[in-house]
Image (tube, rainbow, N blue to C red):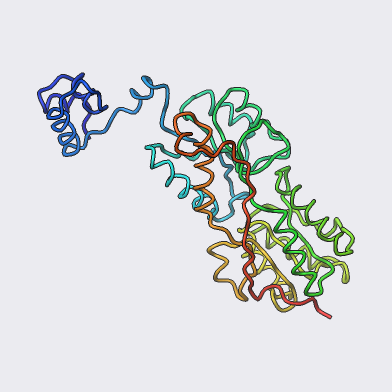
Amino acid sequence: MIGIRDLAQHLNLSIGTVSRALNGKPDVNEETRRRVLEAASALGYVPNQAGRALRSGATGVVGFMMQTGSEITGEGDVFFMSVFDGVQAVFARHQLDLVALLCSSEEDPDAYMQRVVARGFADALIISATKREDHRIDYLATRKIPFIALGRSLTDAGHPWLDLDFEGMAEAGVARLVGKGHRRIGIYAPLDDTNLGYVFIDAYRKALEQRGIAFDPDLVFRAHPNERGGHEIAHAIAAMPPGKQPTGFILTNELMALGFYNGLNQVGLPPGQKFAVISRDSPQAHFLVPKLTSFRLSLRDLGIALAEALLATMPAYAAHYPLGVVRKIVPLELVEGDSDMPAPS
């Protein structure tokens, strides 16, 4: 790997001439430009990004903030890696690079965000796991840092966001289970104030009431969004008095289905035989037996939409993506399986 000084010495040209040739300046003749570009390619020239950043005021880096820890991601995360692939596919068109900003589950997300911004190494940010009231949104807006949120919040700075259609999941899931005779339908909700929990519970309550079923708070099960959390919910269901247990369940988290299946089998409520399950889809869920009835979407396409919506708000890229301020709920497809059997008589 060589720098511009090495390239200039190899060509016996001044550093200034080489720099102007590399940057397409009109005062460099075509023969010189050709020589410089060919030599740069042959020798593996890599531009000094720090120097470019100082001159342009841009780093070419976009940060994606996510929380980590076994209580959040369990044994591994399939959601964000697929989203990252879509995001970077868009950024690569513009020589931008995505950097994951990993906030420990033991650290305050607001404090972490302030530290990231103070260091100034990213041109824009993507935030996730939005809270009901999210101070990060106001913080970024007041500092005029381009950002987009993966998830809605009551905190509204006129910023762009994308979110999954949790209302649609609640409506479709409840409708399907009620249509199969279920009257006691359980759901999962996060332990913290993540906004998706509020959105899903509200939509679930409305879907029940529209079908003449009273909302029962005992059928809302809170746990960590991972395999262990799904396993714990299954055992909590088994510990309920007869007649109080749900007969069907809707999971909004893709990691929980494996643990939930395993737990249900352990407590004598095998999925698809004695208990109905609908969940978010994941690559691991494809190996579950019986086949999981699930909500599916392309996470890579979600990443592409997220990146394009962010670039639409940045002056240097807005002409490529004339989308305005994107605020979009992303639909999911219900894929029928064999896990949501009719209610037992």
**In the image, is residue 164 above or below residue 53?**
below
Of residue 291 and residue 225, the one placed in the foreground of this image is 291
Q: Quadrant of residue 149?
A: top right
Identity of the residue furthest to the left in this view: 12
Q: How many marks?
A: 0
**How far across and down, in percent of the image, does residue 167 sit?**
72, 54
Q: Is residue 27 left or right of residue 279?
A: left
Identity of the residue furthest to the bottom in this view: 345
**In which quadrant of the rendered image does the N terminus lie?**
top left
**In the image, is residue 264 above or below residue 210?**
below
**How far across and down, in percent of the image, does residue 340 sit?**
71, 73
Of residue 182 and residue 28, the one placed in the foreground of this image is 28
Q: Is residue 64 left or right of residue 272?
A: left
Q: Residue at x 21, y 26 (%)?
A: 21
Q: Quadrant of residue 341?
A: bottom right
**How far across and down, in percent of the image, does residue 310 sit?**
53, 37
Of residue 165 and residue 186, the one placed in the foreground of this image is 165
**How far across and down, in percent of the image, does residue 111 sit?**
62, 29
**In which quadrant of the rendered image does the C terminus lie?**
bottom right
Q: Residue at x 15, y 25 (%)?
A: 29
Q: Is residue 249 left or right of residue 209?
A: left
Of residue 136 and residue 164, the one placed in the foreground of this image is 164
